[in-house]
């Protein structure tokens, strides 16, 4: 596998207090994007009250992550947060005003959306079964570096507008968060060097408190910090769980989106494998990670939460911190579950200015794309060949060009494929169709190793 210097694979050597801080760092990394999903979904319904609860979302993210780790033999350092791929489906169901949906309340519409997500999660099991029956080697031959590399690049770059939009709400705070992370990552000593993101969040939030106390505002005149929700929130409270409902219309909207999320899952597994230098595609196996992700998604929807997906933000944290122990991710998951029962603390963390999230995201999202570039370079993808150029070009254009996805109608219902799903499907099809394929999975273990998807035993070349 890749030689990685100063990598920590067992965080216990750092001691319990440092492990707790590292888990907190991962929790902060996923928090902004995870709670953004219910915020966006609630905006689709146009309701002042929360239709999709932040508390339920946090609970499902934490519990889903723990369940994923059980399914993946506790080996994969992945965090499962709210999936953005299903936002188009939520928007479609929120706007339905015909048939049984004409007089349906927002809460019932959400319940039907969750029913569709349960079916989508179960589709993961179908792909996992295919992989188990035919073998990962036959499946991965359709995912060479010329396909997975650009897809990983798209995963990071597709998130880039979100980073810029958040940072633009207050560039001063965003730059402070960015600068602190860079300073601690490059010049930090000891523990501070492996928690640069947490330091960036804490220091920039402290600056935000000072600026707010001095009466300063964001450039648009809005308050830098808003504690209204904190004051009204209780200290302890159960998340407002709700049961799903099923209808063919909602299933037809939500279930096909699983194509997108499954392709993103495979891309994320490749990215995580490459980042930590482990062969997670083989061990614990892609079928196991798919089962964990799929069942976590279905369980989330079963209690009124959004779909789950492996989070690129936390992959960026792994790259920065060089601490690759899955136990740290599980600590972050436990924090998320605990926070879901403490509304006031959830609101305090939720009061974090968007600009700080943007400053942190500048690095995290860029790291994801950089990993994709590294995979292409280390695998020596030959771009003097037209087929490779065409495949990569189409993936990049689809992944970045279809910003609103591709919407089509099935049974009178609009279905939206996300840009990443379109890019993945296009890349896989072109690689299978175009002649001159110069890549054969398993024949060059050294090249496969740089993506973390080789077929060799794990104890070699570590």
Image (cartoon, helix red, strand yellow):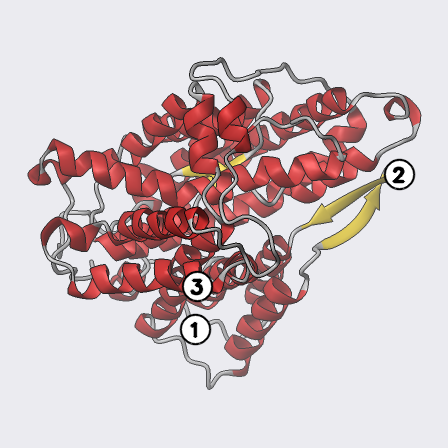
Residue shown at the point (62%, 70%) measured from the top left: 397
Image vertical order of residue 366 relative to residue 18, above or below: below
Q: Quadrant of residue 116?
A: top right
Give the percent coordinates (x, y) of residue 427.
Answer: 57, 63
Compared across the picture, whether 393 is left or right of 205 comes to right
Compare residues 427 and 374 and report the one nearer the observer. Answer: 374
Q: Name the residue that disc number 3 marks.
A: 172
Q: Are marks 2 and 1 in contact (CB under 8 Å)?
A: no
Task: Mark 1: give few (<14), some (14-19) or many (20+) Cα within 10 Å.
Answer: few
Which mark is nearer the camera, 3 or 2?
Answer: 3
Q: Quadrant of residue 406?
A: bottom right
Image vertical order of residue 260 relative to residue 445, above or below: above
Q: Are marks 1 and 3 in contact (CB under 8 Å)?
A: no
Which mark is nearer the camera, 2 or 1?
Answer: 2
Which mark is nearer the camera, 1 or 3?
Answer: 3
Of all residues shown, which one is farthest toward the front? 214
Give the percent coordinates (x, y) of residue 206.
Answer: 33, 48
Compared across the picture, whether 430 is left or right of 63 comes to right
Q: Name the residue that disc number 2 marks.
A: 412
Give the percent coordinates (x, y) of residue 169.
Answer: 55, 58
Q: Which mark is residue 57?
A: none
Whichever of callouts 3 and 2 sits on the residue coming sooner in the sequence is 3
Compared across the picture, whether 309 is left or right of 27 comes to right
Element carrying mark 2:
loop
User: Could one spot residue 290 in this view of the protein?
Assistant: no
Residue shown at the point (28%, 31%) measured from the top left: 331
Compare residues 353 and 361 and report the one nearer the observer. Answer: 353
């Amino acid at each position: 596998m890749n030689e990685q210097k100063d990598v920590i694979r067992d965080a216990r050597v750092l001691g319990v207090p440092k492990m707790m801080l590292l888990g907190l760092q991962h929790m902060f990394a996923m928090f902004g994007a995870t709670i953004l999903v219910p915020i966006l979904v609630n905006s689709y319904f146009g309701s002042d009250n929360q239709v999709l609860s932040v508390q339920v979302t946090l609970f499902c993210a934490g519990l889903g992550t723990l369940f994923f780790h059980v399914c993946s033999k506790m080996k994969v350092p992945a965090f499962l947060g709210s999936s953005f791929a299903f936002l188009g489906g939520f928007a479609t169901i929120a706007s339905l005003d015909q048939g049984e949906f004409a007089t349906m309340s927002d809460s019932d519409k959400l319940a039907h959306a969750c029913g569709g997500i349960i079916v989508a999660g179960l589709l993961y099991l179908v792909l996992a079964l295919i992989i188990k029956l035919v073998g990962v080697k036959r499946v991965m031959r359709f995912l060479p570096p010329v396909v997975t590399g650009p897809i990983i690049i798209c995963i990071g770059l597709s998130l880039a507008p979100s980073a810029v939009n958040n940072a633009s709400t207050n560039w001063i705070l965003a730059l402070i968060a960015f600068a602190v992370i860079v300073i601690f990552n490059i010049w930090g000593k000891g523990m501070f060097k492996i928690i640069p993101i947490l330091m960036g969040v804490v220091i920039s939030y402290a600056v935000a408190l000072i600026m707010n106390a001095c009466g300063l505002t964001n450039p648009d005149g809005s308050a830098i910090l808003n504690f209204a929700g904190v004051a009204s929130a209780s200290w302890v409270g159960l998340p407002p769980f709700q049961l799903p409902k099923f209808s063919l219309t909602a299933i037809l909207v939500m279930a096909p989106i699983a194509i997108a999320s499954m392709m993103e899952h495979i891309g994320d597994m490749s990215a995580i494998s490459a980042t930590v230098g482990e062969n997670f595609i083989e061990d614990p196996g892609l079928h196991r990670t798919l089962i964990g992700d799929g069942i976590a998604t279905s369980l989330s929807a079963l209690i009124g939460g959004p779909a789950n997906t492996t989070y690129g933000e936390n992959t960026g944290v792994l790259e920065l911190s060089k601490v690759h122990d899955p136990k740290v991710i599980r600590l972050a998951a436990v924090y998320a579950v605990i926070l879901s029962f403490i509304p006031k603390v959830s609101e305090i963390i939720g009061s974090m200015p968007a600009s700080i999230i943007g400053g942190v995201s500048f690095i995290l999202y860029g790291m994801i794309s950089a990993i994709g570039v590294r995979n292409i370079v280390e695998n020596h993808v030959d771009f003097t060949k037209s087929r490779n150029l065409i495949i990569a070009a189409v993936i990049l254009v689809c992944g970045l060009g279809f910003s609103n996805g591709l919407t089509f109608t099935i049974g009178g219902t609009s279905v939206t494929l996300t840009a990443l799903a379109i890019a993945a499907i296009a890349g896989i099809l072109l690689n299978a169709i175009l002649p001159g394929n110069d890549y054969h999975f398993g024949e060059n273990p050294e090249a496969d190793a740089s993506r973390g998807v080789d077929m060799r035993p794990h104890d070699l070349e570590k």
